[in-house]
């Protein structure tokens, strides 16, 4: 008799509901795992498409590579006396442009494979400016000389497949004959927290030098996906990027000094000085590290900047955010049924609580699966409507009338409306969620303020 009295008490019911709520952490964790698995599959397909197209696009340069020779006299003492030998060590002098102007115009398209898609682009990268090697030559040692007539112009790219063709290549009024390869002009770039080494992508051409300034004017036909990155190597650099993508995300070490974003695309402009970066105007490759002034370490990748072709609404990210509220949306129907028990004096079995919780958990699976095929707003509407109707009909079997059962339907409408607006307000999500949780707790406290929790069913 005492055991039955305990099992029918309100305190025991509250304890049992708390256990059920904790058990629902298992299915919600499994749903999070499914979302993560689908997102990884999506990224895998994206990488596969982009590997065939040209990957994230990074352009670095142009720079001049000038071959040189260092002569060093080495004195040795032998049985025949002191001997002097001359040691010659080849090196390359790298020189950045005095002025560098870049203009990138792109057209975008969304490539699909099955239900997955990735934004790709193609267009023109126009690079122009001038070189002057006088300053770099003055800093050479007395035993160092360079061969200006053998200089080469080098442009490094993230991927050789990024090049679709050459529209124009002019060097002091003469056409440049480019060949594939970046001649050891190595660098790295970062995208989405990952590092990309690119030591094989690029082009080079013979660019013989003389006295004074040397002008270049190059237009490349390029392609890539998801992001465009540039590295400001000029003493003074000016870059402009425009595309027909309506949701750009400007990323990297520098933000544009001006930009325009409309529903049809964007344009952005960067103006940079060499004083704002840690890349030297010239450096030597191949000399011992003890040589001061030339081999100081510097980072190319930390100075990259550009734009990501951002998906305005990544449904996997939104699903991940939504499932974080899953436990709250299991607690709410539990609380509603518990209050129905108290105020309507209806007995609701723990299994019925369990089914109500599962019904709300299934919402997140419906949302994930529908959002892979439909716009997120429509997928949310279909999933929420299905669960609201299901919960309303199920409540009818537990309560006396349709009027009372629709109370549960109204509660679920409020809950899913609240969740939708929370998901749409990413910057305000924490504040909205906190206010919502506070309001629910306050409402339950108000409704149960006069309830005598010591009273059980057998004493009614």
Image (cartoon, helix red, strand yellow):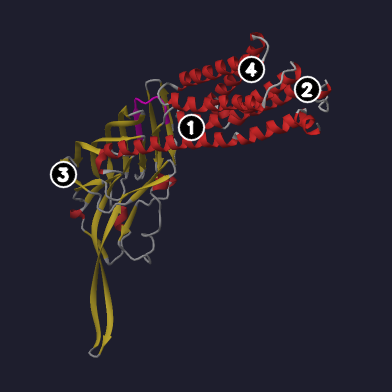
Q: Which residue is mark 2?
A: 448
Image location (x, y in percent) of residue 426: 54, 28
Please tell me which of labels 4 and 1 falls first in the chain: 1
Is residue 256 visible in the rendered image? The answer is no
Asked if the magenta segment contains residue 155, the reply would be no
Question: Whole-Å distance between the Cαs marked 3 and 4?
Answer: 72 Å
Return the mark for residue 259.
none
What is the quadrant of residue 227 in the picture?
Answer: top left
**Alpha carbons under labels 2 and 3: distance apart:** 84 Å
Point out the frontmost of discs 4 and 1.
4
Mark 1 nearby-residue class (10 Å; few <14, some 14–19, many ≥20)? few
Q: Which residues are magenta?
A: 239-248
Distance between the alpha carbons at the discs numbered 1 and 2: 38 Å
Q: Position of residue 416 (x, y in %)?
A: 57, 21
Q: Nearer the viewer, residue 342 or 160?
A: 342
Residue 204 x %, y %: 22, 47
User: Reading the chain from its start, which is encountered first: label 2 or label 3?
Assistant: 3
Up the image or down, 433 lies above or below 176; here it is above
Disc 4 designates what residue? 411
Residue lying at 46% horizontally and 22% vertically, measured from the top left? 376
Which quadrant of the rendered structure holds the N terminus?
top right
Q: Secondary structure at mark 3?
A: loop
Main SS of residues in magenta: strand
Q: Which mark is residue 317?
A: 1
Q: Which mark is residue 177?
A: 3
Secondary structure state at the residue bearing disc 1: helix
**Direction from residue 331 to residue 297 in the image, left or right:** left
* Label located before the other in sequence (3 or 4): 3
State which tag comes first along the sequence, 1 or 2. 1
């Amino acid at each position: 008799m005492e055991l039955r009295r305990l099992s029918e008490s309100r305190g025991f019911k509250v304890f049992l509901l708390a256990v059920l709520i904790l058990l629902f952490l298992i299915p919600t964790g499994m749903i999070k795992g499914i979302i993560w698995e689908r997102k990884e599959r999506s990224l895998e397909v994206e990488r596969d498409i982009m590997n065939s197209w040209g990957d994230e696009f990074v352009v670095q340069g142009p720079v001049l590579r000038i071959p040189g020779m260092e002569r060093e006299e080495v004195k040795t003492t032998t049985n025949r006396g002191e001997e002097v030998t001359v040691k010659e060590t080849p090196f390359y002098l790298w020189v950045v442009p005095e002025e560098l102007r870049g203009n990138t115009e792109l057209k975008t398209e969304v490539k699909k494979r099955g239900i997955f898609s990735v934004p790709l682009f193609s267009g023109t990268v126009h690079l122009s400016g001038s070189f002057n090697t006088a300053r770099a030559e003055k800093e050479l040692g007395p035993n160092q000389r360079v061969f200006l007539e053998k200089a080469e112009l080098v442009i490094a790219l993230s991927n050789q497949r990024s090049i679709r063709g050459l529209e124009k290549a002019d060097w002091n009024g003469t056409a440049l004959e480019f060949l594939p390869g970046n001649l050891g002009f190595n660098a790295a770039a970062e995208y989405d927290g990952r590092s990309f080494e690119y030591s094989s992508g690029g082009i080079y051409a013979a660019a013989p030098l003389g006295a004074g300034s040397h002008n270049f004017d190059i237009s490349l036909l390029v392609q890539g996906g998801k992001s465009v990155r540039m590295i400001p190597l000029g003493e003074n650099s000016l870059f402009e990027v425009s595309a027909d993508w309506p949701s750009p995300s400007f990323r990297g070490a520098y933000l544009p000094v001006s930009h325009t974003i409309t529903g049809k695309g964007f344009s952005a402009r960067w103006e940079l000085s060499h004083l704002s970066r840690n890349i030297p105007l010239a450096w030597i490759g191949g000399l011992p590290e003890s040589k001061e002034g030339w081999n100081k370490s510097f980072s190319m990748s930390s100075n990259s900047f550009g734009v990501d072709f951002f998906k305005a609404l990544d449904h996997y990210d939104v699903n991940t955010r939504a499932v974080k509220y899953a436990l709250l949306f299991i607690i709410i129907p539990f609380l509603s049924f518990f209050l129905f028990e108290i105020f309507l004096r209806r007995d609701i079995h723990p299994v019925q609580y369990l089914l109500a919780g599962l019904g709300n958990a299934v919402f997140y699976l419906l949302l994930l699966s529908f959002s892979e095929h439909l716009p997120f707003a429509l997928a949310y509407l279909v999933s929420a409507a299905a669960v609201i109707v299901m919960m309303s009909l199920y409540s009818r079997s537990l309560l006396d009338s349709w009027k009372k059962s629709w109370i549960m339907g109204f509660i679920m409408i409020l809950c899913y409306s609240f969740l939708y607006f929370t998901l749409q307000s990413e910057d305000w999500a924490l504040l909205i969620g906190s206010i919502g949780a506070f309001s629910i707790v306050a409402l339950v406290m108000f409704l149960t303020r006069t309830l005598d929790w010591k009273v059980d069913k057998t004493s009614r």
